[in-house]
Image (spheres, rainbow, N blue to C red):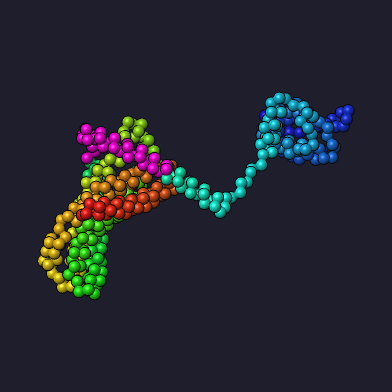
Amino acid sequence: MERPADFSLMDVDDGRKAVLSGDWTATSTGDAAKRLAAAVETEGLKGVDMTPVGRLDTAGAFALIRALRDVLPSDRIQARPETVRLLELVGAAAAEKPVKRPEPRGFYQLAIRVGRGVFDLAGEFFETMVFTGHLLVVMGRVMINPARIRWAACVSLAERAGLDAIPIVAVTSFFIGAVVGLLGANMLRQFGAEVFAVELIGIAVLREFNILITAILLAGRSASSFASEIGSMKMNQEIDAMKVMGVDPFEALVFPRFAALLAIIPLLTFVATLAGLFGGLLVTWTVLGLGPAFFLQRIIDNVGVTHFMIGMSKAPVMAAVIAGIGCRQGMEVGGDVESLGRRVTSAVVQAIFAIILIDAAFAMLYKKLGI
């Protein structure tokens, strides 16, 4: 049972001293500290005897330090060694003042932000290399033993990521082809070369817009889906449970999404090609009066299959980038919802940026090759 904190004053040779008693804790100190502080001011105490004190915690020690601060030196306090040690610890903590560092401004602040950006970029590059290496190991493992492939997951993901995206890909590509045809017809009409709008539509759709529109739509649709699905499993510690059970998350989660997108993106690109050409055909037919037979014949004669193969050659690379970025960002999700939202946003932004960058690299490569 706790005893309430108290003290008494005792006469000594050179003045008076306070003899503390009871338990000086957070629940039993009461107003004893205030009375002790008043006694220090009025009586001019020359010493403190804390030997009779029973229990002492940090709250009581802090109250005693505030009451006896700047009045008594430590050599005038009589107490047990553990009591003296606690008073020293609490006194040192109470004496520390937080150092307020000035906020960086101007060029210094800019240098800090640039340095953090470079450091984060290096960290992202390192994590990407680790992810790529792990994925390559899993791909080699399943190629050696195809029985490890989870075909049900691959087919289901191919349906969700690919077949369900056919309507939006077809509609978007249709309007892109129509817009290209309309702009080409209006521009070429000034030179009396409206007929070349067919070649413009064919090259633009077959070479660039079919894969570009498909990849951008998949980046917003599938990359965000992959990141959110894997990120939610990471938040719920399901991935940790898989590791405990001996299941490789890359083999169970990443590879099926990678394989599904790799298998389905050529189909989506082909659908986008047909839709884009159909949109351009309708525009040339209605605006220029060029019939479907004439349109298709000029596509075959003057555009050919080369541009179509160039566009299709980009599809596997785009699929690998979209699936890889989406899954990697999902694997980097922390334990909070804010991290999930941030990683999903990063997946979409990085995927779209990578698609545009890769398309530009392919354009430069094919220009060097002369095709």
| Depth order, front residue of 148/197 | 197
Check if residue 126 falls in the magenta segment: yes
Residue 154 vertical position relative to residue 87 in the rendered view, above or below: below
* Residue 229 in sight: no
At x 22% / y 41%, what residue is drawn? 152
- For the N terminus, which image quadrant? top right
Where's residue 83, x and y in %? 70, 28
Residue 29 vertical position relative to residue 197 in the rendered view, above or below: above
Tell me: 367 left or right of 99: left
Where are the magenta residues, as a range? 122-151
Where's residue 202, x and y in %? 19, 62
* Residue 51 in sight: yes
Check if residue 281 falls in the magenta segment: no
At x 44% / y 48%, what residue is drawn? 338
Residue 207, image quadrant: bottom left
At x 55% / y 50%, what residue is drawn? 108
Name the main secondary structure of what is drawn in magenta: helix
Where's residue 105, x and y in %? 57, 52
Residue 160 vertical position relative to residue 273 in the rendered view, above or below: above
Name of the residue lying farthest toward the right? 13
Where's residue 10, x and y in %? 84, 30
At x 84% / y 36%, what residue is drawn? 44
